[in-house]
Amino acid sequence: MSEAPEIVIDVRGLNKSFDGKRVVEDLSMQVRRGRIHGFLGPNGSGKTTTIRMLCGLLTPDSGDGTCLGFDILTQQREIKRRTGYMTQRFSLYADLTIRENLEFIGRVYGLRDSAARAREAIERLGLGGRADQLAGELSGGWKQRLALGACIMPKPELLLLDEPTAGVDPKARRDFWDEIHQLAHEGLTVLVSTHYMDEAERCHEIAYIAYGHLLARGTVAEIIAQSQLSTFVVSGDNLAGLVETLKHTPGVDMVAPFGAKLHVAGRDAAALERVAKQFSSPELVWERDAPNLEDVFIDMMSRAQDNYS
Amino acid sequence: MSAAPEKPSLLPASLERLYAVFVKELIQLRRDRLTFATMIAIPVMQLILFGFAINSDPKHLPTAVLDNDHSAFSRLFITSLKATDYFDIRYALAAPEQIDPLLLAGDVNFVVEIPQDFARNLAAGENPAILVIADAADPTAVNGAAMALNGMAAQVFTRELLGPLHRLSSKPAPYEVRLQKRYNPAGETRLNIVPGLVGTILTLTMLIFTALSVTREVERGTMESLLAMPINPVEIMLGKILPYAMVGFLQMALIAFAARFIFNVPVVGNLGTFVALTMLFIVANLSVGYTFSTIAKNQLQAMQMSFFFFLPSILLSGFMFPFRGMPDWAQDIGSILPLTHYLRIVRGVMLKGAGFADLTSDTAALGAFTLAAMTIAVLRFRQTLD
């Protein structure tokens, strides 16, 4: 692909309902080549549905756009040929061995020498000694690595990963993300949905979606800046009692305990300043702090709840 | 965009994808040992169970004897009857009027009537006849006994006919056993039932194999991955049907072997015709099963649909009841079912020596049915998760 478009995913006004319930509402997004795009949002927010619409597994009720330069409504076959989709649930054949699974995929994608390509993929995954083990017998972390290996074996241009690291230990998650960055460095575009903040922070760009609406997008720094959230960190004794009081105090939009400290955030900086003064005492120390991504998302989620649910 | 590079090799690529599914299904089939064992065991077991249950060769059948002769020969004949194990002599009758009530009531399967002066006529070389009346309402019940009777009759007097009577010990026997089958004179059940069983067993097993193929992938979650790959419904369908067609071939071979060597049903017609048309029938049933699996929401539903299809196949195809004897509406339904046409084909080929030319309309019906089922399956196949 010599003239690969710079914008890999470009969709406008996507809508999708199931049984009359709007799951995705008027969603537009762009993803640039070679970027890792994080897709965040609470459970049931429409992340999986959006990913499925992008790779042709679901037909949007309305809206249009392109994926890899192909129309998502009419050229699904071309998109599928060039896209690797890693499903949320392990979806390789549990009763086939690792090698057999990979060879199957090689043949379906019409790879020239699927046996050799499967061998390469197995080596790359570090599964050399276990090629003839049934895929269903692998541990969670290995299943996930295998699934990723299977996705990238046909050399796709776009990778769609639906909560790839759910239920995987931290070390395996770290390795997984190193691999993703390596792939992006090689020119692969990645759209990955996740619930983990540390993973969100490893993305080039993130999009936050709740109740089918895209609420924010940009780099982590941009999203934190856009939020216009003021944050204080409170330390002291008897914070548990303070939580309830603050929750009902005007000017406070979010209270969350973090270990021995309390994160207090509000959209109205002046109002929150007054609250800080009011509750400050020798036992309760209020310190101004930059909001973290989680503060921003939790705040957005509660606002979205008020607006859309 | 640059021109699509893979366009020219469209057909090979499609075959490659079909082959991918084919290999995958074969591996899964091989690994699922229970299913595989069932596939091989079911046809043989069913054939033997059904075959023997229906075609059993019962012995010790209740028999009545009306001996009008009371000679040494007549008594020897009766003793020999008992010795065959097929006849259990329960009644010694005194008058011909006693015969019919016993038969009608079903108290006896056989009545043996030895004529007056049997021994004298035998000695005089007048070729006397012993009358054996068989209740052939259940033809299978009496066939074995009738055969044993014939075998016995030829030899029973060999030892007695020495000395002056030696001239009578020629073959054929110097007397006659006249077997009179009542109620169902030409009932050749065995020949009728075994070819029918071939069709019935293939219907059941083939149907169930593919009925689960799509629903299983949906339930295990592998369908989502499969659909995200560049493969189309026709490729998936043929890739899933072909391995089972091979299993079907194996089953057919086993069943035909059992039919020939266990039940002695010969294939009178051309073996190639039998194989070709049976394969068509196998594919027809695999297509129905596959169609069900594209309609059913889960594996249980697919099984229920299979049985819903299997029952009329048994009842309305001419397997249970003679097809021509059914009311018109039942015949109409029956004409849709593949088993109906296959029964005509298999009986035609196995028993009557029919060839392709004689079976064109039934072959065409099977072909049309297969095509229709496959078309519905492809149309019904959900290419998306909508």
Image (tube, rainbow, N blue to C red):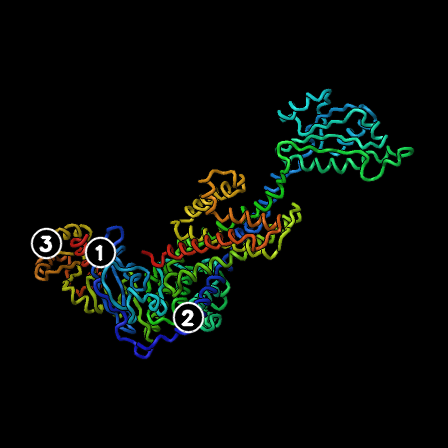
- Residue at (76, 27) in percent of width and height: B114
As shown in the figure, which amino acid type bears the numbered disc 3? Pro
Mark 2 and mark 3 in contact (Cβ < 8 Å)?
no
Q: Name the chain under label 1.
A: A
Task: Give the labeled residue for mark 2.
Answer: B10
| For marks 3 and 1 on the same chain, the one whose residue lies earlier in the sequence | 1
On the same chain, marks 3 and 1? The answer is: yes
| Residue B108 shows in the view | yes
Query: Residue placed farthest to the right in the image?
Result: B163
The secondary structure type at the circle numbered 1 is loop
The chain letter for the residue carrying disc 2 is B
Left of A118 or right of it: where is B194? right
Q: Quick one: B380 or A269, which is closer to the camera? A: B380
Q: Nearer the viewer, mark 2 or mark 1?
A: 2
Q: Residue at x 83, y 30 (%)?
A: B122
The residue singled out by tag 3 in the image is A250
Q: Which residue is mark 1?
A: A211
Q: Chain of mark 3?
A: A
Classify 10 Å Cα crowding around label 1: few (below 14), some (14-19), many (20 and above).
Answer: many
**Amino acid type shown at disc 1:** Tyr
- Location of the N terminus of chain B by quadrant is bottom left
Q: Residue A86: name its quadrant.
A: bottom left
